[in-house]
Image (cartoon, rainbow, N blue to C red):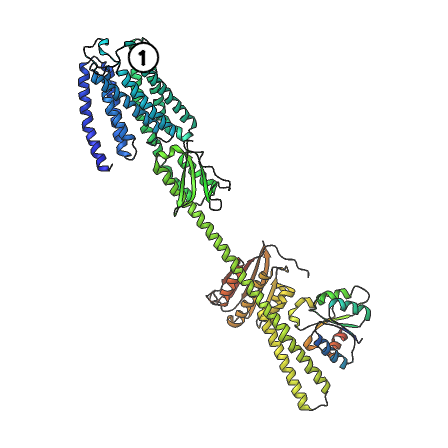
Amino acid sequence: MNTILIVDDHAGFRVQARALLEADGFVVVGEAIDGASGLTAARSLRPDVVLLDIGLPDIEGFDVARELAIDGPPPLVVLTSSRDASDFGPLLTNGRQLGFIPKDELSGDALRALLDAA
Amino acid sequence: MTSTTDRRLRRLTVVVAPLLLVASLAYLATTDASGLRIGVNAIVAGTYLATGLLAWARRPANRTGRIMVAIGLLLIFEPLQDGAVPGLVLVGGMAATVADLLLGYLILAFPWGTLRSRVDRGFLAVSAVALLSANIVAYSGYDPRLAGADVDNPLLVIRDPALADMAVALSRLTSIVILVGFLAIFAARWARASGPARRIYSPVLIPSTVLVIAILVANLMSAVTVPDDIRLAAAVTQALARAFIPIGFLVGLLRTRMARSAIADLVVELGDAPTPARLRDALANALGDPGLSVAYWSPAAAAFVAADGTPAELPADGSGRAVTVLERDGEPIAAILHDAALLADPGLVASVASAMRLAVENERLQAEVEAQLGEVRESRARIVAAGDAERKRVERDLHDGAQQRLVSLTLALRLARMKLGDDGDPEVRQTLDQASEEARSALVELRELARGIHPQILTEAGLGPAIESLAGRSPVDVDVDLGTDRRFSPAVEAAGYFVVSEALTNVAKYAEASRALVRTTWGHDELTIEVADDGAGGAAIAGGGGLRGLADRLSALEGRLEVVSPQGGGTRLIARIPTGAPVELPG
């Protein structure tokens, strides 16, 4: 349970996220810069986890999460954002994602905590 | 003529006329003219004098009174033409002719006091010339010796009896033609007149028609031999008809006067800001003219148009209808199209026009106020919307700029801390930990700031979740009762959010309350938001306070804010916002 696909349009975050997660034992198998390429990558790479930014340029992260569930067993989706949870309220409790980690709280431990609770 | 001159002339008439009458009667008593005829004539003359003086006194501007007095004076001499003195016969004849011509003028000029159509004017002018010439011609063939009198006619020119007879016949023919002409004009006028006009005309036209027919009959009878009784009866009928005409004038003028009392009712009715249809009906009623119509000036078309915008046709001269134009500052604003007979009382139409001007002015001012109010509403809504858009922009800038950088900084510090591990320099470790704390605090503060500027949750999840978020962050216990989970336009949701935000802020800062309640309900296209607390009360929408700003924001949306806050009795804020059709956004 340790392959990750990072979907985020912000290059700086992708670099930092990869560095943080790989330092904690995860394997980052791919990166995508928007929802469409994220869906394609997810289907071809079949990662265990997708770290998905809510604010993507083409589709909202919530919709991508929904799409991921359509063909075959979906990967676990962890939503992220520069904003914190209180900016999204009930949207984070409904929907197909496993959970939400604000970007500033991202770390291998935080991710592992979510995965263990699944 | 000034009014003092008028009064003096009237007094003179009152003195002179009876003297003339007495003199004339005295003379006539010496002739063998019928006593009945002289008596009736005197009465008729008296009727004209009395009515004329009355009309002159009441309506000095109208010529009718003076002309009637003149007729009365002339009629005093009328019986002289049956006498024996040729000079007096001529005087009597001319007096009678001129009196009849003046009467003809009065009848055609009724009720305005002047002739209004070219046909009338032309006809009367031609009649005058023809009749007077015919009289002179006939007189120049009149030989009193043929009737057995013992005097000469100094103006006897036509000596041939046959020619003299022809002259008389010609004179009679002229009279007959003129009389028939009068009948034709009466008939045409009656046919063209509307109801109210006929009511005004009839008291004069009826005796006038009788008179004309009587004179016609008399003229025709003079060509044949008729028993004296019948001749006398005809003469008396003529005299009576003549006498009834001035009475008819008075009645007719009285009928135009009665319409004035309707003006008072009209003003009250028009004060109610009537629709164009009601306005027309009110005016038609007041003036007794059912065919009345109202036209409004259209600056765009530079013409009068009916209330529905179609062009209005102005009546032609002599068509029996007239137009009274209402003006403001020299520019036309409206016109009343009515029966021409109503112009007989100039004050009448003027009063109606004034009343209507008030109503039209009222309507115009109301329309202007509505338009201005509309502009104000729109501009207020635009200002609020612009403010909200600006806030969103600032929040976005904060998010895209400073927030991203702090996030990046936080992650970089975390990476550095990880790389350092637990074995590195403890001072470096401590510095990194402190730096991380600082960055975290900065981010939290920034997020708070951004939320105060524009709550992103409102855009993402709607009013309900935004209210719950506010309640959760309040230091006071807040119960939330959401009666609707519908979404509304951004302006409405923003207004609702700020009501709750401001109210809960006040509760936390001033109310000294232990609990608060936020309730939303939606019904009849109106969103209601209530925030109540059990604190100290005493809140008010004072000028400049946060509640004032709220009230303004709500007004811009046609909503309203109610504050119930008795001292010591807690505070209740109730905001009502019209929502129109709610917006169903995908969840």
Kindly indicate the quadrant of the structure image that contains residue B321.
top left
Examine the rendered structure and indicate whether residue B137 appears above or below residue B301.
Answer: above
B145 on left or right of B477: left
Say which quadrant the N terminus of chain B sits in: top left
Kindly indicate the quadrant of the structure image that contains residue B435.
bottom right
Seen from the viewer's position, the closer of residues B445 and B25 is B25
Is residue B36 something one can see in this rendering? yes
Seen from the viewer's position, the closer of residues B116 and B560 is B116
Where residue B260 sits: x, y (%)? 35, 37
Q: Residue at x 72, y 88 (%)?
A: B422
Where residue B224 sits: x, y (%)? 33, 9
B30 on left or right of B427: left
Identify the secondary structure beneath mark 1: helix
Q: Which residue is drawn at 39% across and 43% down?
A: B355
Type of the residue with mark 1: Met
Say which quadrant the C terminus of chain B sits in: bottom right
Where residue B179 sits: x, y (%)? 35, 20
Where residue B497 sits: x, y (%)? 58, 65
Examine the rendered structure and indicate whether residue B479 appears above or below residue B207.
Answer: below
In this figure, which residue is indicated by the disc labeled 1? B166
Q: Which residue is drawn at 49% across and 69% down?
A: B536
